[in-house]
Image (cartoon, grey):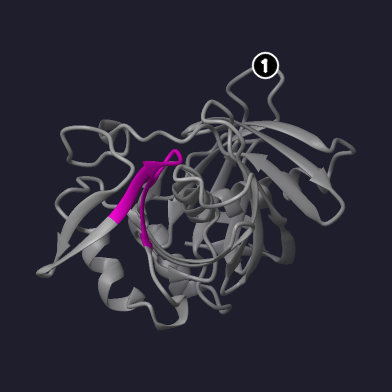
Amino acid sequence: MQFEYLEMQGAGNRILVVDERGSGRPPPGPAQILRLGEVLSAPRFDQLMWVLPARHDGHAASYRVFNADGSEVEQCGNGVRCVARMLAMSSTDTVFMLDSPAGPVEARLQGDSVSVSMGTPSFEPKNVPFVAENAAKCYQIDANGAEMSVSVLSMGNPHCVLEVDDVTAAPVASLGPLLETHPRFPSRTNVGFLQLVARDEINLRVWERGVGETRACGTGACAAMVAMKRTDRVADDVRVNLPGGQLVVSWRRPADPVWLTGNAERIREGTIDL
């Protein structure tokens, strides 16, 4: 299988964008996607965004999201910003409506930044999914004999958020995979390690489901901000500092969508044969 790709990055998250709007060709299988990391000479990619024709009138495109391990996931905040930037490279439009696996997404371009509406967060355990009798702002969860308090929500994909005193010392590599595969998350989960700096700033590291620790995670940034906003510990607009760069997350009222703003840059183009 041969295809052209555009390698991009958003806040340090390495994204491969493949534009198949013209052909509607289905994506490669999990084993082929897994091989991408072996074939590419650049550092490993984090997500593959497979762009297809729109499913609704007035929308620019649809897309599917795959992690580097070949697993298909529901959403990728940094990836959708890269898709919007790719679309703008051949268009004068600055606003795009996109069909995502998690629902419609609006993308707005302004200068070097791309803002995307990530939908309304869901706290219902069955929507995450998460094993719990009732929805709560925090849950006690046992991991390897240690009990900890976590926030759990869906941003179109599952997230577990854990507050720490210092993200640089957080046990991301050891605790991340334990929580990712915890039996209370039947579909696995992304895990955010959050340090509250001020009402308008947090530091964050994310262990991504199917990838491991990444330099940035857009939906993870949204989940971390939302978890803090639910207990009125942050403002409506929050800077989220990640190892790969900074994102801005905005959320005002529970019924409002969460907006994610950050850069989306082209790195190179290429052709690959799997």
Instruction: Determine whether 269 is above or below 81 in the image.
Output: below
Closest to the observer, 252 or 38? 252
Residue 221 visible in the current orientation: yes
Relative side of 198 to 180, left or right: right
Residue 161 within the magenta-colored segment of the rendering:
yes
Q: Residue 164, located in which quarter of the rendered image? A: bottom left
Residue in the picture at 52% in, 55% down: 48
Residue 6 visible in the current orientation: no
- The x, y position of residue 179, in whole percent, is 24, 61
Q: Residue furthest top?
A: 57
Which region of the structure is painted magenta?
150-162
Closest to the observer, 89 or 179? 179
Closest to the observer, 122 or 150? 150
Residue in the picture at 60% in, 40% down: 251
- The x, y position of residue 134, in whole percent, is 21, 32
Q: Residue furthest bottom?
A: 169
- Local crowd size for mark 1, using a 10 Å CA cut-off: few (<14), some (14–19), many (≥20): few
Residue 159 within the magenta-colored segment of the rendering:
yes
Q: Mark 1 sits on what residue?
A: 57
Amino acid at dot 1: Asp
Q: Residue 6, located in which quarter of the rendered image? A: bottom right
